[in-house]
Image (spheres, coloured by chain):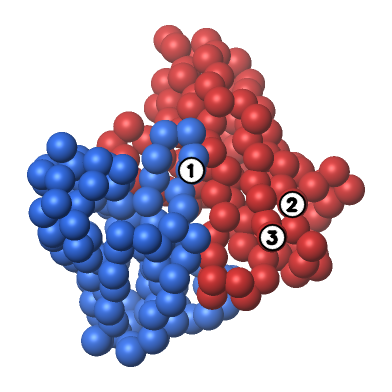
């Protein structure tokens, strides 16, 4: 079975601070995919990144960066110089075996509040 | 606009009523699925379909039915609504059975059962 743990329920930061959202996953599969989604107050799910288990390179996209470490089963997400518009719920998700077709297993989400 | 369309956006039901949440996609995606989102629990898979005429249960299927008569549509039916079904429902689609193609999510339906 697969499991995703986002231990941080809620994080509050002041604008321009850096913030890291933690994600720890469990799977027995050797081939799997990890995702991050953003859910702003408007409610839609916005895709941020997909990473497969064979690519451990860290990725940077503007103020966003992701650190994938198979040794610790973690896929952490860092926002540099946070902005109020970054306030949202962030979900980490995992898709591994063919159980349930293309089942995405989501973490519980981390609420990020960025204050001006 | 191409994408996944969910209707309605909001719905209030009385306990015991039935209704259908609609989901349509115009991307010719074979794979479609329904998730429910509850506070502190992320999104959980209700039902999914790998193609027209093929459906299967996810991890929380009780109280819900689905059908897939066309590639485009994947409605979710609540046969007898219960307060425990108060949630936000998301429909998602994907090109094929391979997750590398990613998912497209609808904008969600917020359902309240009183």
Q: Are marks 3 and 2 in contact (CB under 8 Å)?
A: yes
Residue A31 sits above or below residue A69 on the image:
below
Give the quarter of the figure containing the C terminus of chain A: top left
Q: Are marks 1 and 3 in contact (CB under 8 Å)?
A: no
Q: Check disc 3 and report the residue beneath it.
A: A1
Between A116 and B40, the residue placed more toward the observer is B40
Query: Residue A12: which numbered mark, if any?
Result: none
Between A85 and B65, the residue placed more toward the observer is B65
The image shows residue B77 at horizontal and vertical percentages of 22, 65
- Separation (CA) of disc 1 from disc 2: 16 Å
Query: Residue A26: which numbered mark, if any?
Result: 2
Callout 2 environment at 10 Å: few (<14), some (14 to 19), or many (20+)?
some
The image shows residue B91 at horizontal and vertical percentages of 33, 61
Q: Which chain is red?
A: A
Secondary-structure class at tag 1: strand
Identity of the residue furthest to the right in this view = A71
- Separation (CA) of disc 1 from disc 3: 17 Å
Q: Check disc 1 and report the residue beneath it.
A: B42
Secondary-structure class at tag 3: loop
Lateral position of residue A47 relative to residue A32, left or right: left
Q: Chain of mark 1?
A: B
Chain B is which colour?
blue
The image shows residue B57 at horizontal and vertical percentages of 44, 71
Secondary-structure class at tag 2: strand
Identity of the residue furthest to the bottom in this view = B53
């Amino acid at each position: 079975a697969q499991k995703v743990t986002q231990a941080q329920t809620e994080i509050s930061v002041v604008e321009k601070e850096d913030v890291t959202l933690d994600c720890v996953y469990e799977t027995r599969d050797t081939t799997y995919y990890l995702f991050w989604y953003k859910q702003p107050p408007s409610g839609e799910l916005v895709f941020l990144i997909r990473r497969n288990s064979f690519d451990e390179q860290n990725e940077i996209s503007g103020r966003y960066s992701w650190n994938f470490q198979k040794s610790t089963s973690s896929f952490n997400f860092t926002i540099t110089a946070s902005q109020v518009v970054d306030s949202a719920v962030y979900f980490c998700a995992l898709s591994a075996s063919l159980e349930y077709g293309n089942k995405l297993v989501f973490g519980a989400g981390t609420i990020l509040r960025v204050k001006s | 606009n191409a994408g996944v369309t969910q209707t309605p956006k909001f719905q209030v039901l009385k306990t015991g009523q039935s209704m259908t949440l609609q989901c349509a996609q115009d991307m010719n995606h074979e794979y479609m699925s329904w998730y429910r989102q509850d506070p502190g629990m992320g999104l959980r898979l209700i039902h999914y379909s790998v193609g027209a005429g093929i459906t299967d249960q996810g991890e929380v299927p009780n109280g819900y039915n689905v059908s897939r008569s066309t590639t485009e549509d994947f409605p979710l039916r609540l046969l007898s609504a219960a307060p425990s079904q108060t949630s936000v429902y998301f429909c998602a689609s994907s090109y094929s059975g391979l997750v590398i193609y990613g998912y497209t999510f609808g904008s969600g339906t917020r359902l309240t059962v009183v």
